[in-house]
Image (spheres, helix red, strand yellow):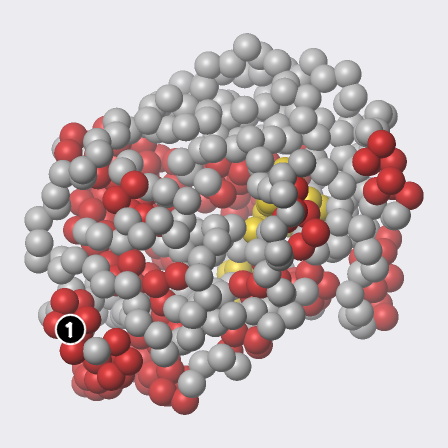
Amino acid sequence: MATKKTPVKAAKPAVKTPQAASRAGMSTKSQSVAQKAAPGLSTSRKLEEPTTKKAGKDASAGAATSPVLSSKELPQSKTASSKSDTKSLVKKSGVSETKSSDQNKAAANGSVHYGAFNGKANGKSNAKSDGKNQGDTIPDVAAGPIPKADTGLEKDLVKKPAGSLKSPLRIFQIYREPWQRDLLDPNFSGLDNSKGNSELMDFAVFEQLLKSDYVKDAQLWGALSWRFAELTGMSGADWVKNIQTHPGYDIYFCNPYPQIEALYHNGWMQGETAHPQFFALSQAVFQVTGLPVDELTSLNPSDTFSSANFFVASPKFWAAYLPWVRNILTLANKKLPPKVRDLMHSKLADKQGIHNGATYIPFIIERLFPVFMKTAGKSMKSYKIALPERERELNVHLKLLREMKDVAHRTKSAWLGVCWVNYRNLYLTQINGKEWAKNNLRAITPTDMKFS
């Protein structure tokens, strides 16, 4: 068992900076809102060949609780079916027939244990497979009492905890290290992804769940990071309550970094300050895949920002969104020039080493959600869950900047949009310094005022 690390306190999460707005589940250094954002390269500079070339190959994708869904080449779409030969299959009740001593202890504490994540091969894998299940299991739901909520909600959660195979709402919480299990929310079902090493990260877990029996017949399902409480400042009970009190939506999401809603036109502009050559690479991807290039520079309202893949959605959403993203990645790998494709799969994206050596792929994926909702998913209804703890961390300037930008978008006022840009630039210059402003403001300030 790995040495237990001191867990991050979830009660009073540290404030995240705009540069930290990236894939959920990866450790980042908490900083003040007023601290400096990481400098990026100007969009006027040409794409450079990465120091270390990497062919468009994808590492093995998968949670430890399912058959390995991996791909040697990201653009590949050929798949191999597999059938589980695991002896401990999930009973109709969702409880495994065999339990380890640890599982028995968890059961004694009121935890729920699920059997092998067999996937049932109703989906297809991108990897060569021996057709056998790895026999891993989804770990127990974290033991402990359900956080206090209103009486009706408490009773409902006790009867059907989110994540239960009998619940219409099934929410999983992804973790990679044993010590992270102590930080899981008791309202979610722990999902061991310690063996998962896919370049796609959380997206690979979503694809696996879609093909598994664990979401069969669910009305809503999703998979969140083990850092959920830290990033959102919210308990699982509150998250479930928000969903249950606002029924009828196809997708529920949030944005743990509301400061980027105030300071950037959209997520793509913010990415330029955090990942070298991000905007130019994104522009190339949009051009070869047929995505609307104007989305990269358009002014987006705050209610469309999402930066952590914290999704709980209907089968309709998942069945449309996941293939849509997969198709974009496949087209990009086929049509991008070799040097640009190599850059996309390079670790230059995580030059500072704060995302465990991630490539550009997960940072592109997490910004595609708003684009999907305006194109292929425009018929679907979305609900953005507010995060009071994160909102309280915004200073008066950030609140005014966000409101100003939202009014400019709502009224389609180019004049007010330009006023917002000037105010924003003064704020960033004051906070980050003249040198940062000289290197970044031009790159994150489009010459035309467009509204998404």
Q: How far across and how far down the image is residue 97, in percent?
A: 85, 26
Tell me which residue sits at (29%, 58%) in the image.
Answer: 274
Camera-nearest residue between 286 and 239: 239
Q: Is residue 161 visible?
A: yes
Q: Is residue 410 visible?
A: no
Tell me which residue sits at (15%, 34%) in the image.
Answer: 339
Name the side, left or right, on which 391 lies relative to 396. right
Residue marked by disc 1: 435
Query: What amino acid is at disc 1?
Result: Glu
Q: Quadrant of the N terminus?
A: top right
Name the side, left or right, on which 202 lies relative to 142. left
Tell me which residue sits at (67%, 55%) in the image.
Answer: 183
Name the side, left or right, on which 16 lies relative to 289. right
Q: Residues within 10 Å of mark 1 (few under 14, many from 20)?
A: few
Q: Quadrant of the C terminus?
A: bottom left
Q: Is residue 228 above or below residue 257?
A: above
* Secondary element type, mark 1: helix
Q: How far across and how far down the image is residue 36, in percent?
A: 30, 72
Q: How far across and how far down the image is residue 44, in percent?
A: 8, 57
Looking at the rendering, which quadrant does residue 77 occupy?
top left
Camera-nearest residue between 376 and 176: 176
Q: How far across and how far down the image is residue 160, in percent?
A: 81, 51
Tell me which residue sits at (8%, 49%) in the image.
Answer: 46
